[in-house]
Image: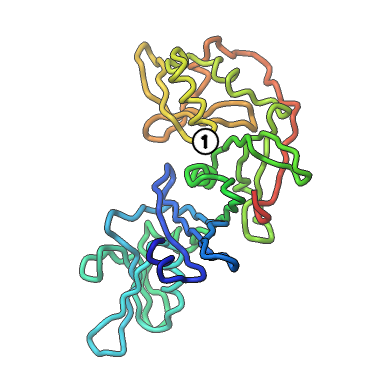
Amino acid sequence: MEENMKANLPEFILKDQINGHKGQIDLNLYFKQSGQSENYYLNKYDLALNEGKPLEAGHKYLVIAPSETPGKNNVFKRENVAEAIEVFKKHTGNVELAVGKDAADKTRLASMEEGKINYVEKDFARTFRNPPLPQTIWVERGKGFTASQSVNLIEGRAVYREDMLTQGGTPYRAWMKLDLDGPRDRHMNFNLNQYHDPSYGFNLKEVLDKFNIKELENPKDREKLEAQLKNGDRPIITVEKNGEQVKLHIEAVPRYSQLNMFAANGRPEKREQFLKEPALNKPVTKSKGKEVSTSQGLGI
């Protein structure tokens, strides 16, 4: 950032990667200089979930193609898998897509001969066929989803926001979740489903109190747990199973006014076994609230 600002570039993009529960999340951060001053602004960033194997430290995606100099190759390095696939597919001759520290230390992912793809590594095939599309997150005067919240959204979890505004400027609170199963909008972003608080009916404190979770016994631990869940995280909790204390991951599911629980290996656990009172034969209570869907294209 500092180097680009010193060079007085009118705009530039910085890249980053974050390892999530479901894969690597690639981020592009867009900086633009003001037309009236030397100030730079971060008004948006985008992120894409690559569910394939995350990059190892010091590794990059490599597109290797012959150069005009006989016996030498051009090596195009990318940290974003979708960009690497795009560069690879634009070539028309003999070219290789790989991952590694450099061309001498690489693992081949795909190859092309005379413009025709002749090899795609098995574990990379799904990512190669369907490169991850980015989700744009807009920032308005320093307000918006943080990077960690955006990672949780793109992985399918809900995030709680207390600083939302209606088009008329009225503040409200809501749980937000990307509709990953629905179509993208005209800006090619997923729509956001909103579960307004308190009208939708999901009360995190009340739902937590239904379960025998050790962290709820200590006020500070409880406060931390609630904050992590509202951020969309999957915090670790302590519960009792078969007479022994075990650690599980937990996440908030506002749509169904529930919690999901997972073992360390990601396997779902039946939450009913950790209830303070067994829920056998109890009717399911549906929320009276209304799910609201909004477009992310104009900024949230």
Judging depth in this view, the residue of 151 and 112 nearest the camera is: 151
Q: How is the image coloured?
A: rainbow
Task: Indicate the position of residue 174 as horizontal and vertical percent values.
Answer: 66, 35
In-image side of 99 versus 105 (left or right) = right
Quadrant housing residue 118 = bottom left
In-image side of 50 versus 186 (left or right) = left
Which residue occupies 56% across, 55% down?
A: 135
Task: Indicate the position of residue 68 as horizontal and vertical percent values.
Answer: 31, 90
Name the amino acid, label 1.
Asn
Instruction: Please name the residue that numbered disc 1 is placed on.
Output: 231
Q: What secondary structure is found at the residue carrying circle 1?
A: loop
Task: Indicate the position of residue 237 as horizontal and vertical percent values.
Answer: 42, 23
Number of labelled discs?
A: 1
Which residue occupies 64% across, 13% down?
A: 281
251 over 123 or under it: above or below: above
71 over 228 or under it: above or below: below
Task: Indicate the position of residue 8 as horizontal and vertical percent values.
Answer: 45, 70
Judging depth in this view, the residue of 131 and 67 nearest the camera is: 67
248 over 299 or under it: above or below: above
Quadrant showing the N terminus? bottom left
257 over 171 or under it: above or below: above
Which residue occupies 65% across, 46% down?
A: 192
Extreme front residue here? 37
Which residue occupies 29% across, 54% down?
A: 56
Judging depth in this view, the residue of 216 and 283 nearest the camera is: 216
In-image side of 105 versus 111 (left or right) = left
Q: Residues within 10 Å of mark 1 (few under 14, many from 20)?
A: many
